[in-house]
Image (tube, rainbow, N blue to C red):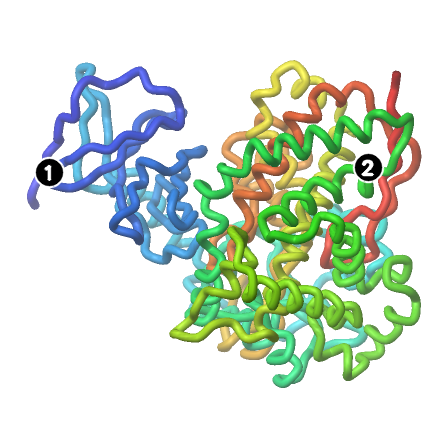
Amino acid sequence: MTELVWFGIGEAEEAHVGFLRLAEVGGMAVCLGRTAEGWVAFQDTCTHEDCSLSDGELDSGVIVCPCHGSEFDLRTGDVLCPPAFEPLPIFEARVEGGELQVRLGPPPAAAEAVHEQEVHIPQAAAEAATTFAPAVDGPVLAEIDLTDLAVWEQGVPHEWLTLLRREAPLHWQPEADGRGFWVFTRYDDIVQVSKEWETYSSETGGTSLEDLAPEEILARRSMIDTDPPAQTRLRDLVNKGFTPRIVNSYEERIRGLAGGILAEAFERDAFDWVEDVAAEIPMWVFSEIMGLPIEDRRLLIELGDKLLGNTDPEVVGEQNVLELTSNDPANRLLPFSSPFAPELIEYGCRLGAARRLDPRDDITTHLVEAEIDGSRLSEEEFGLFFILLTAAGNETTRHTISLGLLDLLAHPDEAARLIADPSLAGTAADEILRRAHPVHHFRRTATRDITVHGRSIKAGDKVTMWYAAGNYDEEKFADPHRLDLGRQPNRHLTFGLGGPHFCLGAHLAKLEVKIWLEEMVPYLDRIELAGTPTRLRSNFFNGIKRLPVRVRS
């Protein structure tokens, strides 16, 4: 066996954590980075040959590509966030006698991690597992009903989710008005399901719990309801507008917007945090990058609320909830089965038509001019794209900021910690995102028979991944129910870690939350609850409708 050679790079620098540099090692371009544990080395290019990872971002053992935003685990080389699919070659690095050295072979940690990963792949366990019939759970587990919206309206049922992680990592949940569905609650299982899109499809049955006919799925299909390669082509249309480099260019503008919105709100004695702050920050940002008239932002917020709050009678009206639960055929052809979807689609189509006539430097223009296989998006496709971006670009971050404030008010010691050390905002943003996940779950559909955790999933079964559970997995997060603004590492599942559907706007959302926390520091010791928060009646969306607050003088 040939012994690998150590190459000397030069004197080891006293580099800060996150530092990246490019070096030529054995005729190969190698990127070296400084983490809290020491030096790491890896191939300098991933997908684009003209893009250097040394220009990227190193964060807690993860390298982020500056060109398309792909993320790689520097312990194993695994893709954590597409569009890249091929692992990144990882090399061994050390400091010997004051010299930084690299060996062009995988470090021992990478080989061990790969072995661990193989052991934990559900299919590996499936081969020797015994087949069980669905819905055979113990009497305590049988009391769990994840479809009970009244429970979710009171808050995340962590007692249920903890019990499921411990006792039934693959649980069968019956439905009163459906076929029932499988529930994954452990972190590793959720990552695996996210990665294995060929087995767990977004396209076959859609991503909501509704049992839809093929024509209904087709009529409302957006990027999140497709699998690669079609999903990859659609994602590539907008991906360049959300790379870390592009997103970071928005920082000062976001800071100015957030600071101004907070300053205006805190001029009052009392206000609704959701309406006056949490909804305003992401919608102002979204309006600017999409090129929307800022005066339309309240209309878009209202339509977005009705689109995603379709199970809450206060948001959409009792009659619309009744129509949803009665499976109205007309609504089933609409995104989220919402009768308010056409108005939002129409708005998007008008905007797209305007940009075709008057192109500008915004994402809307990029979408209407971009081509897939030589053809551009149809008006219908653009309308569905617009709905998806409106929901993802506004509603999600808004609720994270609302839930984040609620968390800080409930943990004054951690709030004081942030006030004393605002540099914690980066890690604090990830901790807020972990705990204030805006989406509780997503659905997939099994494409083949498979046995996992001793239970038999049949082709066509609905399979759900519960981020509300995985983000609190004790195997991944120490003391997971404790708010720790300095928590590291913090590879939460809020953005859908590990598969082709990793959140397109993850970098933007994290930047918005980080800037909000930084700009919030002068106000944190001046704000208190002025009433009971009102939560959204939904087991899909983790939202707050109202959060009354009072300003202390």
Count neighbours of disc 1 (C-alpha within 10 A) and say few if under 14, some if 14 to 19, many if 20 or more. Answer: few
Residue situated in front as seen by the camera: 481 or 390: 390
- Label 1 is placed on what type of residue? Gly
Q: Is residue 421 above or below residue 76?
A: above
Residue situated in front as seen by the camera: 146 or 217: 217
Q: Is residue 313 above or below residue 462?
A: above
Report whether residue 132 is seen.
Answer: no
Mark 2 or mark 1: name the one nearer the start of the chain: 1
Query: Which residue matches tag 1?
Result: 26
Query: Which residue matches tag 2?
Result: 273
Residue situated in front as seen by the camera: 53 or 180: 53
Where residue 142 sits, quadrant-wise, is bottom right
Considering the image in quadrants, where does the N terminus appear? top left
Residue at (33, 46) in percent of width and height: 77
Distance (Cα) linking label 2 and label 1:
57 Å
Tell me residue 512's x, y (percent). 61, 38
- Label 2 is placed on what type of residue? Trp
Circle 2 — which element? helix
Where residue 141 sits, quadrant-wise, is bottom right
Residue at (67, 70) in percent of width and height: 181
Residue at (65, 49) in percent of width and height: 287
